[in-house]
Image: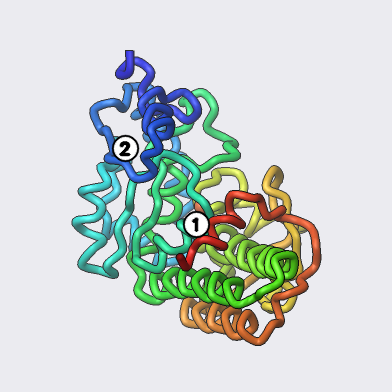
Amino acid sequence: MLEQAGLTTRQSPFVEHERHEGHVFIEQPYELYSEANQEAWRKLFSRMRPRWDRYANARFLEGIDLLHLDPARIPRLTDINRRLGPLTGFEAKAVSGYIPAFLFFDCLRNRRFPTTVTIRPAGALAYLPEPDIFHDVAGHVPMHTDKAFAATLVRFGECARTAAEIAAGIHDPDERVHRLSSIMRAMARFFWFTIEFGLMKSPDGLRVYGSGLLSSFGEIEHAIAAPDVQRYPLQPEWVINQGFAIDRYQPLLFVVDSFDHLFTLVDTLEKWMRSGKLNHVAPGEPEVNEKDLNSFLSGMR
Ligand SMILES: [Fe+2]
């Protein structure tokens, strides 16, 4: 029965069982992928390939080659990690689903990337609100072969620790929750507009490095080519105050010069966190949920 169901998003008894047992980190049960799962990967990969060639950042394309991603088969994380480890020390770590925000960032700090193992149904390739292995492995992981990008992710992880440290130092409980929620909102916005939806300058014009775009057949083109998308140089003071909706193509995107530039921006984020500049960012999306908040509150314990 398990084998028949495969590892399909929202329909995977294996993953549901692991989650039910409280297992956050799991092994990728490769033998459970069904033929339909493999077909979903093939279709997703083959239609993305020409769009990557046209719109993706050069380091992403190199990453696809360095990892030997197979267009025909869902990758084994052990194969990926064998190639990825020597390059940047990063590792794709299989998880059973959503993990609380602090734990997610702390994984990044330790160069582990929480990776979804399920794949969207072969008949619904277009839009998926939750991550799947195509988003995580074909959208995120190739970027982790780049040293400056990898260092930026680690810096995000360090920011989360700084946030938890700051929160632990605030005595009044209401004040603690208020300030921490604001800092978390700023971090989530920053992550969204860079790691998930970032654009970068290149000698040939704008290119995509954000994984939300790199794993979306429709939006990768829309992000670069649609005349009504607003594309502005990334200003941290704007990004930390800018809400976003996750259920539509992004009408506003931010551009960085390089991965070294991106690293310095995350550095700025941490400095601002320490100086109190993130304590009252604009309200709005994303809402900070209780589980994520608690993960930060107990993060330093
Ligand atoms: Fe993502």
Category of crowding for the residue at label 2, using alpha-carbon neighbours closer than 10 angstroms: few (below 14), some (14–19), many (at least 20) = many
Question: From the image, which quarter does the C terminus lie in?
Answer: bottom left
Q: Indicate the position of residue 64 as horizontal and vertical percent values.
A: 34, 56
Question: From the image, which quarter does the N terminus lie in?
Answer: top left
Q: Indicate the position of residue 285 as horizontal and vertical percent values.
A: 74, 55
Q: Give the residue at x 51% y 63%.
A: 209
Q: Amino acid at mark 1?
A: Arg
Q: Could you give the CA–CA distance between mark 1 and mark 2, rounded to whole angstroms?
A: 23 Å
Residue placed under numbered mark 2 in the picture = 74
Does dot 2 land on a helix, a strand or a loop? loop
Of the pair 71 and 26, the residue shown nearer to us: 26
Q: Indicate the position of residue 161 as horizontal and vertical percent values.
A: 49, 72
The reply to whether the residue tagged 1 has its Cβ within 8 angstroms of ligand 1 is: no
Category of crowding for the residue at label 1, using alpha-carbon neighbours closer than 10 angstroms: few (below 14), some (14–19), many (at least 20) = some
Residue placed under numbered mark 1 in the picture = 54
Does dot 1 land on a helix, a strand or a loop? helix
Q: Amino acid at mark 2?
A: Ile
Of the pair 20 and 99, the residue shown nearer to us: 20
Q: Indicate the position of residue 167 as horizontal and vertical percent values.
A: 61, 72
